[in-house]
Image (cartoon, rainbow, N blue to C red):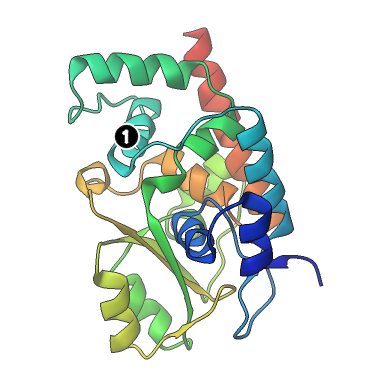
Amino acid sequence: MSGVGVAEAAAVLGVQPQAVRKMLREGLLEYEPGLRGIAVVVSSASLARLQAMRARGSGRPWSERTAWAGIDLLSGGSAGWLTPQARYRLRRSVEQQTADEFLWSARRRASVYRYRGDAEAVPLIAAHVIPTAASAVADDARVAAAFGLAGGSGIVDGYVPAGVAQQISAAYALAEDPGGNIVLREVTFTEPLANGTPMPAIALDLADSPTTRERSAGMRYLEGVLAHGRSS
């Protein structure tokens, strides 16, 4: 079995175990894919990536609002909730980033909760979320084509307002499961999602997938739009 426990990850990073659990919720660290049960197992790959980012001095990830501003700018938007000065600084930062760096910077865009639910609950829960990642691919042929992926079934991955994940969990008797088929991404700032999940956000969520093909598709898309921004 690969992966490490919360206590070991905390020791490696020099933080308290509760900080590791917070990093898991925020996506700074990831669960080891395919491992279910009571014990929380941190992905060794995500732990190594976090250490490497720290060693390279990549800085702290953006706040939630700044992360969504970066996503909006990459989508061709204006991030109108920022001041002109903050927007200018962020635009310059985004223009200089690699896909890995953008993925790191935008990690605090949501708090992620993973559950397992039965097949009957999936379409009911899907009606309450703004789809992203595999759900967005399954729902929209244009998204699927943009990432070169085929849509699946039996999963939900989407954004919800803060506090809604627990409500949905209680309503549908979901069980917390790091490898579950229901992923709810809570945000406190919903303005950037008014017209659906922006493509760069879908790419970021795919890039965080435990599935190699989805992860590669997300990173490839980010590399493309970042390169286009640098050349324009």
Q: In the image, is 193 to the left or to the right of 25?
A: left
Task: Tell me residue 203's x, y (percent).
Answer: 51, 43
Task: Tell me residue 51's x, y (percent).
Answer: 67, 42
Task: Tell me residue 215's x, y (percent).
Answer: 64, 49
Q: Is residue 157 visible?
A: yes
Q: Is residue 32 visible?
A: no
Question: Closest to the observer: 55 or 161?
Answer: 55
Question: Closest to the observer: 135 or 56?
Answer: 56
Q: Residue drawn 55% across and 50% down?
A: 206
Examine the image and state in which quarter residue 185 appears.
Answer: bottom left
Q: Which residue is mark 1?
A: 66
Looking at the image, residue 168 lies above or below residue 8: below
Looking at the image, residue 36 lies above or below residue 226: below
Q: Residue furthest right?
A: 1
Q: Quadrant of the N terminus?
A: bottom right
Looking at the image, residue 11 lies above or below residue 146: below
Q: In the image, is 141 to the left or to the right of 69?
A: right
Question: Closest to the observer: 155 or 110?
Answer: 110
Q: How many marks?
A: 1
Classify 10 Å Cα crowding around label 1: few (below 14), some (14-19), many (20 and above). many
Dot 1 lies on which element? Answer: helix
Amino acid residing under circle 1:
Thr
Q: Residue drawn 57% across and 55% down?
A: 29
Q: Residue furthest top?
A: 232
Examine the image and state in which quarter residue 52 appears.
Answer: top right
Q: Residue drawn 25% across and 62% down?
A: 162
Q: Residue drawn 51% across and 60% down?
A: 24
Task: Tell me residue 136's x, y (percent).
Answer: 44, 56
Question: Closest to the observer: 155 or 48?
Answer: 48
